[in-house]
Image: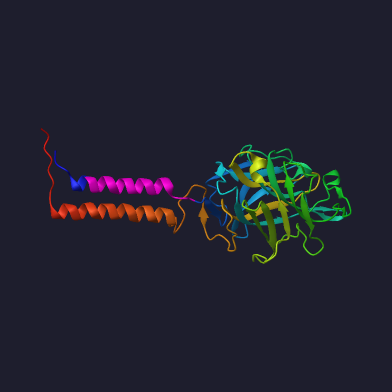
C-alpha cells in the first residue's frame, strides 16, 4: 500500500478546518440600521415597518387606541457567555392622543428578554409585556398607569411621571430599579432616544443608559444586580420589544437596533442590516482557533516536506 502524502495533506487540512469550526467561539451579533429588511425578526400584532421622513422604522403601535405590537428575534438566541449581553437601540414615541387636557402619550415601549416564544405581546398599561414569564424588561413609560405605577416606600409615586425602569417576570407593578426622567426628558416628546443596556454575567450587574444625542453616557442611569441564569433556567432566549396603547395612544417606533450575546458595550449606531445568524462582517477567529489553525497548517507543512524528500511505500505480505 502506498502512503499518499497528498491525500494525508488534504485530510489534515480538512481536520484543521473542522477543528476550527468546532472550537471557534462565535459571538452572535446582529444589527438593523433600519427596518426595510426584517429578515430574522418575528413581527406580532400591529407591528409593521413604516417609512417616516425617509427612514424605515419599526412601528410597534400605530397612533390609535387599544393597540399592541411586538418584535422579537425569530429564533432563540443562546446567551452562552454567562448570560451576558449588550444592546443599543433608538426609540421614538410620537403622534400622541390630543385631548382636552393636551397631548397624552401611551403606553410605552419595553425592551424584553424572555424564554417563552417569539410571538408574545398584549395591550394596555402592561406595555405589551405583562404576564410574560420568565422575563426581564427595561421599560420606557410616559404614562400614568394607575395601579401599575406603585407608590414605593419613601419615594412617593411614579404616577404622572415619565420613567425608565428595570422590570421582571412580566409584572408591570414591580419596579426593580427606576429613574424619573420628566420634566427634563419627555419620553413621548417625538425625539429620538438612544438606550444602552448591558448585562455582565460575571458580576450579575445590569446597567441602563440613555441619551438624546446618540452618544453613550459614561455613567449608568440605572443599575441592578440580578442573576439571569437563575431567572431564566435556560440560555435560549428571545430578545426584542413590546409596546401597547389603551384609551390614550402614541405611535411607538424602534429606529435602529444592535445586539450582541456578550458583555461588550456598544457605542456606535449600526450602519446596515445584519440579521441574527448572519456571518459577521470582518469576523476573525478567536485566539484558540488561530492556534489550532496554525498547528494544522504546520502539520500539513511537515507532511509536504517529507513528500519532497521521498515517496514511502509499504507492502503487505
Report the side of 263 relative to 176 (left or right). Answer: left
Q: In the figure, is residue 66 to the left or right of 236?
A: right
Task: Please state which of residues 88 and 193 is positioned toward the viewer in this rendering.
Answer: 88
Magenta segment's dominant SS is helix
Q: Position of residue 246 (x, y in %)?
A: 78, 44
Does 135 appear in magenta? Answer: no
Q: Residue at x 76, y 42 (%)?
A: 171
Say whether residue 164 is visible. Answer: yes
Quarter of the image containing the N terminus?
Answer: top left
Q: Give the residue furthest to the front.
A: 317
Residue 33: quadrant of the picture = bottom right
- The picture places residue 167, in percent across and down from the top left corner, at 74, 47
| Residue at far top of view | 317
Q: Nearer the viewer, residue 226 or 32?
A: 226
Q: Which residues are magenta?
A: 8-26
From the viewer's perspective, is residue 87 above or below residue 40?
below
Amino acid at each position: 500500500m502506498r502512503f499518499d502524502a497528498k491525500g494525508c495533506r488534504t485530510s489534515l487540512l480538512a481536520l484543521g478546518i473542522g477543528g476550527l469550526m468546532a472550537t471557534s467561539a462565535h459571538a452572535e451579533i446582529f444589527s438593523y440600521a433600519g427596518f426595510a429588511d426584517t429578515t430574522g425578526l418575528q413581527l406580532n400584532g400591529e407591528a409593521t415597518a413604516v417609512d417616516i421622513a425617509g427612514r424605515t422604522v419599526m412601528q410597534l403601535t400605530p397612533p390609535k387606541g387599544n393597540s399592541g405590537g411586538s418584535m422579537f428575534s425569530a429564533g432563540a438566541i443562546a446567551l452562552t457567555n454567562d448570560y451576558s449581553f449588550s444592546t443599543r437601540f433608538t426609540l421614538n414615541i410620537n403622534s400622541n392622543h390630543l385631548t382636552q387636557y393636551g397631548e397624552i402619550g401611551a403606553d410605552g415601549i419595553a425592551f424584553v428578554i424572555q424564554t417563552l416564544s417569539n410571538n408574545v405581546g398584549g395591550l394596555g398599561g402592561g406595555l405589551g409585556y405583562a404576564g410574560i414569564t420568565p422575563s426581564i424588561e427595561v421599560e420606557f413609560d410616559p404614562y400614568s398607569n394607575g395601579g401599575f405605577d406603585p407608590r414605593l416606600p419613601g419615594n412617593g409615586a411614579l404616577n404622572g411621571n415619565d420613567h425608565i425602569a428595570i422590570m421582571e417576570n412580566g409584572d408591570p407593578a414591580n419596579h426593580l430599579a427606576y429613574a424619573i426622567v420628566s420634566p427634563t426628558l419627555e419620553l413621548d416628546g417625538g425625539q429620538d432616544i438612544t438606550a444602552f443596556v448591558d448585562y455582565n454575567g460575571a458580576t450579575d450587574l445590569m446597567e441602563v443608559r440613555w441619551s438624546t444625542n446618540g452618544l453613550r453616557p459614561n455613567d449608568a442611569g440605572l443599575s441592578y444586580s440580578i442573576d439571569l441564569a437563575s431567572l431564566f433556567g435556560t440560555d435560549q432566549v428571545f430578545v426584542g420589544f413590546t409596546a401597547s396603547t389603551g384609551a390614550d395612544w402614541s405611535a411607538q417606533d424602534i429606529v435602529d437596533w444592535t445586539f450582541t450575546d456578550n458583555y461588550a458595550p456598544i457605542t456606535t449606531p449600526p450602519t446596515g442590516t445584519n440579521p441574527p445568524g448572519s456571518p459577521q462582517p470582518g469576523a476573525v477567529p478567536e485566539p484558540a482557533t488561530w492556534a489550532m489553525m496554525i498547528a494544522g497548517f504546520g502539520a500539513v507543512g511537515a507532511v509536504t516536506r517529507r513528500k519532497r524528500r521521498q515517496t514511502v511505500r509499504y507492502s503487505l505480505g
